[in-house]
Image: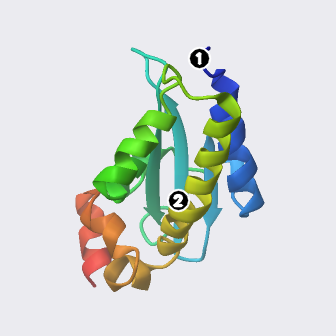
Amino acid sequence: MTHARPDVIKNAFDRQLTAHGLTRRSNSWYQSTAETICVLELQVSHLSSKYYLNLGVLLRDLDGEPFPKERLCHVRARWNDLVDEDQSARIDHLLDLESSIEEAGRVDVVEVLIRDSLIPLVSACSSLDSLRSGPGRVVVDNALVAAAAIPVLTG
């Protein structure tokens, strides 16, 4: 079985994320609300043919950048760190282009995971209330949080 082509993963993310209203710039997608900007960055490993999806949340009270880099966000995590162990392993396997998975099947499963797992995480990051005590709290509890963001997220 041949390895998947790199554009297969990127195209699957682009189809699903733009269909759910995110705006694409290069290898990142953005969802902006009055209080936050959620950034999804598709990163390829320099050591292998593996992709990672980084999620960042910029708090607009602290920064007005409309299209921030994920690494400059106040809350940062990998998708794998925001799901259970089984789903994390599944994501790792699917985003590794060297995994022996038939291309069409890979795309189908990746798109379902984006729709059923990633999009709800993006929605959970759309307000400060959600990040403080709602479904977005899962993101905050499993992410790197900038010191400047702690008072905003606990206030």
Percent coordinates x, y for residue 139 in the rendering: 35, 65
- Amino acid bearing label 2: Leu
Percent coordinates x, y for residue 122 in the rendering: 53, 65
Position of 59 with respect to 30 (left or right) is left
Which residue in the protein does label 1 denote?
Answer: 3
Residue 71, visible in the rendered structure? no
- Amino acid bearing label 1: His
Percent coordinates x, y for residue 46 in the rendering: 43, 17
From what the image shows, is residue 86 above or below residue 152?
A: above
Name the foreground residue: 57 vs 83.
83
Specify the color scheme. Answer: rainbow
Residue 86, visible in the rendered structure? yes
Which of label 1 and label 2 is nearer to you?
1
Name the foreground residue: 145 vs 112.
112
Callout 1: few (<14), some (14-19), or many (20+) C-alpha neighbours within 10 Å?
Answer: some
Q: Which quarter of the figure is the C terminus placed in?
A: bottom left
Whole-number angstrom distance, CA of label 1 to CA of label 2 = 24 Å
Picture mark count: 2
From what the image shows, is residue 34 above or below residue 58?
A: below
Under circle 2, the secondary element is: helix
Under circle 1, the secondary element is: loop
Position of 140 with respect to 8 (left or right) is left
Q: Residue at x 71, y 35 (%)?
A: 104
Q: Residue at x 71, y 45 (%)?
A: 14
Q: Which quarter of the figure is the N terminus placed in?
A: top right
Q: Residue at x 52, y 59 (%)?
A: 118
Which mark is drawn over residue 118?
Answer: 2
